[in-house]
Image (tube, rainbow, N blue to C red):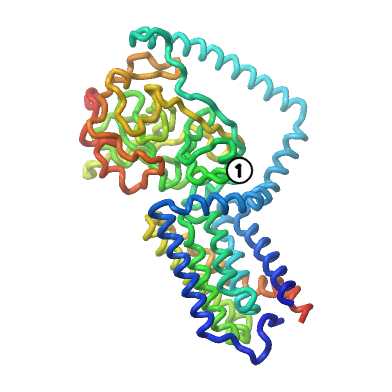
Amino acid sequence: MNREGLGRLLLTAMVTLVLTVIPLPAWADVIRPQFLVLAVMFWSINAPRTGGIAFGFFAGLMLDVFQGPVLGEHALALSLAAYIFVREHQRIRSKPDFQQALIVFAALTAYEVVLFAIDGWTGHPVTSLLRWVHCVTGALIWPLIAPILAFGAGRRA
Amino acid sequence: MAAFGTGAGRPLQRGGSGFRFTLYAVLSVVAMYFDQRGHYLEQVRYALQGAAYPIQLAVSSPPAAWRWLKESFQTREALQAENTRLRSAERDLEVRTMRYEALAAENGELRGLREALPPVADRWLAAEIVTVQASGLRQRMLLNRGATNGVFKGQAVIDDKGLIGQTVHVGPWSAEVILITDPEHAVPVRIERTGLRTIAVGAGDTSTLALPYLPANADIKPGDLLVTSGLGGVFPEGYPVAKVTEVHRDAVQPLAQVRAAPLAHLDSDAEVMLVWFREDHPAAPTRAVAAKPDTVGELSHGNPGIQPQAAPPKRPPAPPPPVPDATPVPAGTPPASPGNAAAPSNPPAGAHP
């Protein structure tokens, strides 16, 4: 199953990466959730061996190439998010959707705090409040995203 | 919900994930350090950018397909109108070129040279814009030309109206361009009318540049044209950048608040030009050595409104020009480097009435 699991993982990573970087009008860009981050979180909960920290790291590296000021910024933030979710995956997995969304909100905020700090330290500060909007929209969309990502996996089990 | 990867009752060891996290965290921190400091990761970035390019192309294909559809279903009338417009534009350009040749010849004679100088731009390469990030505070675009086309880091990018930006990361088949309106980008400019030198910093949206380092009594007014000053080592002298739109002077503020609108169509272009400049040309970007005093004169570039000696003669910058490497000047640092802008402390003669 590991091979197939990995294939599905990479497929969702590709799709969510495209959704994350596809050009959108300015207003939509502000509220666009970070789909790839959500996917990393989902796989960290549901397949912590296949997905998890390494997956988070490489997904973050891709994000760095697309939109990071320094290589390694998103990689660090995303491996942190993946680590939290892998560590607590059993506890989070058993929670109802609403509570999961709250946890996701907290994790997205932590992720953005890491990015914010690194942006500042490396001399590319972005102090607009708009950068935090995606934490809210990401948490709101989580109950929708999770069943979609689970669809293939659920059929297999 | 499925839980493949972990069998029931077979939890992951916590220590294991903690160790792996530490490993990857250290790896990212090291990557950041080297990318930030020594640019040791250029090779890694180059490879990753090559790997990312197919995705970027795929991502940009829906808008591109839409553009192509719109173009192929254009009506005959629209095409004819465009044709007429282009033809008149071409006539206009030809007239300007004639005038330019005359001016250049006259300039060359005045300098006592045997023949007129060749144009500063050596060659051009048209590049298509693959994606634009012009939202939020990041103003970047991706071009479909890269190192295989000879594109290098810190290369000037222009369109037919003015300056667009410079390349920051070059991949094998693509190059990332930072726009002049990015808040992290600063371009050394000169006010065409007075010759006053200053720095134009991006303001974070595609229609605004800020000139934060001008004293309140500086001679500047709405409508003034800003051209590149040739300092900074990336852009050659004399390329149009922006038009001043708004000058705000406050009695209690020592600095004037000036805004300008870029001349290039930063948000509507589909194609831009990458430019290579002659290294030995007097108007070429000053790289390591200061230009010789007798060659720092004006080189007007075909604007019929400009008289050859309209601007006051510039003094060569006394300290060597800063920022010899081509990285974008961080927005916070320019006032600290005296030779770069020197607007408040060292205005050219005639700047203050």
Q: Is residue B205 above or below residue A98?
A: above
Q: Position of residue A53 (x, y in %)?
A: 56, 73
Q: Tell me which residue sits at (46%, 27%) in the image.
A: B277
Q: Is residue B299 above or below residue B36?
A: above
Q: Quadrant of the N terminus of chain B?
A: bottom right
Q: Tell me which residue sits at (61%, 59%) in the image.
A: A20
Q: Is residue B114 above or below residue B345?
A: above
- Element on which disc 1 rests: loop
Dot 1 crowding, Cα within 10 Å, few <14, some 14–19, many 20+ = many
B56 sits to left or right of B99: right
User: Toward the viewer: B106 or B114?
Assistant: B114
Q: Quadrant of the C terminus of chain B?
A: top left
Q: How many marks?
A: 1
Specify the amino acid type for callout 1: Trp
User: Toward the viewer: B181 or B298?
Assistant: B298
Q: Position of residue B65 (x, y in %)?
A: 72, 43
- Quarter of image, res B222: top left
Which subunit holds the residue at mark 1?
B
Q: Tell me which residue sits at (28%, 29%) in the image.
A: B219
B292 sits to left or right of A22: left
Question: From this viewpoint, is residue B216 visible?
Answer: no
Q: Is residue B293 above or below residue B31?
A: above
Question: From this viewpoint, is residue B352 visible?
Answer: yes
Q: Position of residue B228 (x, y in %)?
A: 39, 30
B285 sits to left or right of A77: left
B141 sits to left or right of B242: right
Q: Tell me which residue sits at (70%, 40%) in the image.
A: B67
Q: Position of residue B149 (x, y in %)?
A: 58, 36
Residue ID for mark 1: B173
